[in-house]
Amino acid sequence: KGLYVYCTKGLRTGDFTSIYNLYDFAVSYMAANNITPRNPALWDIVASTWRTWGQLPAFYNNLQVSRVSFFRRSDVTKWHEALTEVSPSRVLRHGWSDGTMRVFTMAMFAEEDWVLTKTHDGYRHGRAV
Protein backbone atom coordinates (compact mmCIF):
# COMPACT_ATOMS: atom_id res chain seq x y z
CA LYS A 1 0.00 0.00 0.00
CA GLY A 2 1.17 3.49 -0.78
CA LEU A 3 1.37 6.35 1.65
CA TYR A 4 -0.65 9.00 -0.20
CA VAL A 5 -4.36 9.61 0.35
CA TYR A 6 -4.67 12.52 -2.09
CA CYS A 7 -2.85 13.78 -5.17
CA THR A 8 -3.50 17.00 -7.06
CA LYS A 9 -1.64 19.56 -9.18
CA GLY A 10 -1.27 21.98 -6.26
CA LEU A 11 -2.76 24.98 -4.51
CA ARG A 12 -4.17 28.14 -5.99
CA THR A 13 -5.79 31.20 -4.52
CA GLY A 14 -8.05 33.78 -5.96
CA ASP A 15 -11.01 35.97 -5.29
CA PHE A 16 -13.46 33.12 -4.93
CA THR A 17 -17.01 34.20 -4.27
CA SER A 18 -17.87 30.73 -2.97
CA ILE A 19 -16.08 30.94 0.40
CA TYR A 20 -18.72 32.82 2.40
CA ASN A 21 -18.37 31.77 6.08
CA LEU A 22 -16.36 28.63 5.20
CA TYR A 23 -13.33 29.52 7.32
CA ASP A 24 -15.45 30.41 10.36
CA PHE A 25 -17.52 27.26 9.93
CA ALA A 26 -14.40 25.07 9.77
CA VAL A 27 -12.84 26.71 12.84
CA SER A 28 -16.10 26.27 14.79
CA TYR A 29 -16.42 22.66 13.63
CA MET A 30 -12.86 21.88 14.72
CA ALA A 31 -13.45 23.43 18.16
CA ALA A 32 -16.76 21.62 18.66
CA ASN A 33 -15.23 18.28 17.65
CA ASN A 34 -11.87 18.75 19.39
CA ILE A 35 -9.93 18.53 16.11
CA THR A 36 -6.32 19.62 15.86
CA PRO A 37 -5.12 19.89 12.26
CA ARG A 38 -3.05 16.85 11.34
CA ASN A 39 -1.33 18.93 8.68
CA PRO A 40 -0.28 22.09 10.55
CA ALA A 41 1.73 23.46 7.61
CA LEU A 42 -1.32 23.35 5.32
CA TRP A 43 -3.53 24.76 8.08
CA ASP A 44 -1.09 27.66 8.48
CA ILE A 45 -1.43 28.40 4.76
CA VAL A 46 -5.22 28.40 5.10
CA ALA A 47 -5.24 30.64 8.18
CA SER A 48 -2.62 33.10 6.96
CA THR A 49 -4.22 33.40 3.52
CA TRP A 50 -7.54 34.15 5.20
CA ARG A 51 -6.07 36.66 7.66
CA THR A 52 -3.89 38.41 5.11
CA TRP A 53 -6.04 38.47 1.97
CA GLY A 54 -9.55 37.44 2.98
CA GLN A 55 -9.19 34.57 0.54
CA LEU A 56 -8.84 30.82 0.89
CA PRO A 57 -6.59 28.42 -0.98
CA ALA A 58 -8.09 25.73 -3.19
CA PHE A 59 -6.64 22.63 -4.75
CA TYR A 60 -6.67 22.39 -8.51
CA ASN A 61 -9.40 19.81 -8.97
CA ASN A 62 -9.39 19.09 -12.70
CA LEU A 63 -7.49 15.88 -11.97
CA GLN A 64 -7.44 14.38 -8.49
CA VAL A 65 -6.40 10.95 -7.27
CA SER A 66 -7.85 9.95 -3.92
CA ARG A 67 -7.64 6.96 -1.61
CA VAL A 68 -11.29 6.03 -1.05
CA SER A 69 -10.63 4.39 2.32
CA PHE A 70 -9.37 7.74 3.68
CA PHE A 71 -12.55 9.54 2.62
CA ARG A 72 -14.66 6.77 4.18
CA ARG A 73 -13.08 7.24 7.61
CA SER A 74 -15.70 8.22 10.18
CA ASP A 75 -14.04 11.54 11.10
CA VAL A 76 -13.75 12.59 7.45
CA THR A 77 -17.29 11.41 6.67
CA LYS A 78 -18.67 13.34 9.65
CA TRP A 79 -16.96 16.53 8.39
CA HIS A 80 -18.35 16.06 4.89
CA GLU A 81 -21.82 15.39 6.29
CA ALA A 82 -21.61 18.64 8.27
CA LEU A 83 -20.80 20.43 5.02
CA THR A 84 -23.45 18.80 2.86
CA GLU A 85 -26.13 16.98 4.81
CA VAL A 86 -26.80 18.89 8.03
CA SER A 87 -29.49 21.50 7.54
CA PRO A 88 -29.02 24.04 6.18
CA SER A 89 -26.75 22.49 3.58
CA ARG A 90 -23.93 24.96 3.50
CA VAL A 91 -22.63 23.72 0.17
CA LEU A 92 -26.00 24.37 -1.48
CA ARG A 93 -26.74 27.57 0.44
CA HIS A 94 -23.32 29.18 -0.05
CA GLY A 95 -22.03 27.30 -3.12
CA TRP A 96 -18.75 26.50 -1.39
CA SER A 97 -15.88 25.51 -3.65
CA ASP A 98 -15.04 21.80 -3.64
CA GLY A 99 -11.36 22.64 -4.18
CA THR A 100 -11.38 24.82 -1.06
CA MET A 101 -13.29 22.26 0.99
CA ARG A 102 -10.73 19.65 -0.05
CA VAL A 103 -7.92 21.85 1.32
CA PHE A 104 -9.73 22.00 4.66
CA THR A 105 -10.21 18.22 4.62
CA MET A 106 -6.52 17.59 3.97
CA ALA A 107 -5.42 20.16 6.57
CA MET A 108 -7.71 18.71 9.22
CA PHE A 109 -7.35 14.95 8.65
CA ALA A 110 -4.30 14.08 6.50
CA GLU A 111 -0.69 14.06 7.62
CA GLU A 112 1.56 16.34 5.58
CA ASP A 113 3.31 13.46 3.82
CA TRP A 114 -0.01 11.89 2.82
CA VAL A 115 -0.76 14.66 0.30
CA LEU A 116 1.13 14.79 -2.99
CA THR A 117 1.03 17.91 -5.13
CA LYS A 118 2.65 17.67 -8.53
CA THR A 119 2.10 18.37 -12.19
CA HIS A 120 0.79 15.33 -14.02
CA ASP A 121 2.73 14.75 -17.24
CA GLY A 122 0.46 13.99 -20.14
CA TYR A 123 -2.61 15.66 -18.65
CA ARG A 124 -4.02 18.81 -20.21
CA HIS A 125 -7.27 20.49 -19.29
CA GLY A 126 -9.28 22.34 -21.87
CA ARG A 127 -8.59 22.59 -25.56
CA ALA A 128 -5.71 20.63 -27.03
CA VAL A 129 -2.80 22.65 -28.35
Image: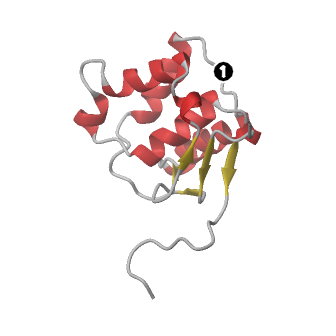
Q: What residue did someone put label 1 on?
A: 36
Q: Residue 74 vs residue 113: left or right?
A: left
The residue most toward the bottom is 129
| In this view, 56 is above or below 3 | below
Residue located 38% across and 53% down the image: 16
Which sits in the foreground, 38 or 63? 63
Q: Amino acid at mark 1?
A: Thr
Image quadrant containing the C terminus: bottom left
Residue 58 in percent (x, y) is at 50, 50
Residue located 68% across and 50% down the image: 116
| In this view, 54 is above or below 3 | below
Q: Which corner quadrant of the image does residue 98 belong to?
A: top left
Image quadrant containing the N terminus: top right
Numbered-mark total = 1
Q: Residue 35 vs residue 97: left or right?
A: right
Disc 1: CA contacts within 10 A as few (<14), some (14-19) or many (>=20): few
Residue 23 in percent (x, y) is at 47, 34
Residue located 64% across and 37% down the image: 43
Q: Residue 88 vs residue 12: left or right?
A: left
